[in-house]
Image (spheres, rainbow, N blue to C red):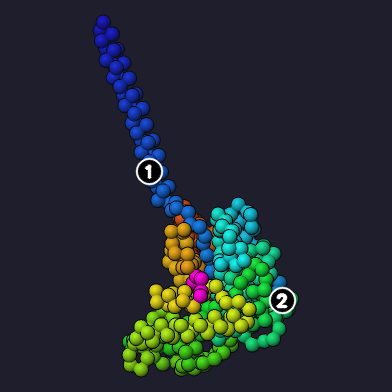
Amino acid sequence: VGACLRRRPRRRHGAGAARRRRAGAALGAAAAAAGLAIGHRFMMAPPACRSLPTIRSVRPPPGCPGRRKSRSIRTRCAVTSPRFGRPGGRSYRPASSSRRGRRARAVPANAVVLHFDDGYLDNWLHAAPILIEAQAPATFFASLDFVAPGKQPRDRAACDDGRGYMNWPELEALDAEPLFEVAPHGIDHGRVAVSDRIVGKVTQANWRSLAWLQWAQMPGPKHDWYLHETPPAVPVGAPVPESEGALAAAAFVGGRRETQSEYRARVRDHLGRCRDMFTRRLGRAPALFCWPENRVSAAAREVAAQLGYAASTGGEGRNTAAEPSHILSRIHAGDRALGFRWGPAEALRIRAAVGLFAGNHYWYLVAAPMDLTRRLVMGLRERFGSRFA
Ligand SMILES: [Zn+2]
């Protein structure tokens, strides 16, 4: 009995503990599963229907004499990567932004749209052949004042380093290619002063990043502005006013801000001149408009719609079906993902950027350490000069 008495409660106690342990484990597992499910929901936003990486320029392929000189960004790796560029691949599928001529077709799942801004010559020389090879559609945005003179498309075999801008025959040839379309990026890529507040001054070190000040004083063609060694129009020491994208805000001129109707009239004139020039050159009205620096206002969007532009850039959303279809949100595809140029890293970082944009926050696990490395390497480079990396 004693043994029984001793044993039974012990058995009961043992059974209860096991039950409690089992229950505890089940509860823990359920909590962990719920945590993971909630975490997963937090990590995975609802899918966006398309994402829009923007690329400005592409470096010449290996073996070109101009390669070393080139200061443009290297995205060849990203565009040619089978995980990124091949249509029908398991990953992202390049699609056309305005789906010109195939309106009825739905946007494929995992679609990305490639935008090339600013009309750089390397787009014609180096990007277009890669895109054609990958059968990847793309849109090229050019600013009228920066279109280079020239009556012939330049020879790709010449292996030019691609500095400078495309000419009209090159833009026309791109637009004639069924994969591509060419659309306006404004006239002068300008900014305007928005007050009489001075926020800095022009120096030899900063004048290129403040090029809008020079452009504003250089009416007409500006395709060769980058060849100047010193500021061509506004001298070192000149004040820099508070400014905003020229199409995004009322300008401060003659001691006052433009009225809303003056501002709208300026935007209408600007967008109308772009539409007319592109229509004359390409034989059709442009469907898209790309706001310089992605700076835009609600009033400017309204003017663009009135002038017949179907959509324009500058959105800050994710291009989901719930968002207005006339606003295109884009992400910037940069280079030096690790602080130095290395093809596979650039491809991975762009892949992560597109994944994050599409709502898959697991890509932070890739992007965050890469961005941290980049910051460290850039910091070291700043400290120790170009000897490092
Ligand atoms: Zn631009």
Check whether the beta carbons of the residues at disc 1 and disc 2 lie within 8 A of each other.
Answer: no
Secondary structure of the residue carrying numbered label 1:
helix
Q: Which residues are magenta?
A: 308-312
Q: Amino acid at mark 2?
A: Arg
Left or right: 324 in relation to 122? left
Reading the image, the residue beneath label 1 is 35
80 w.r.t. 307: above or below = above
Quadrant of res 169 = bottom right
Q: Amino acid at mark 1?
A: Gly
Q: Residue at x 58, y 86 (%)?
A: 223
Left or right: 97 in relation to 200? right
Q: Which quarter of the rendered picture does the C terminus lie within? A: bottom right
Secondary structure of the residue carrying numbered label 2:
helix
164 w.r.t. 106: above or below = below
- Decide: few, some or many residues near mark 2? Use Cα within 10 Å; few <14, some 14-19, many ≥20: few
Q: Which quarter of the rendered picture does the N terminus lie within? A: top left
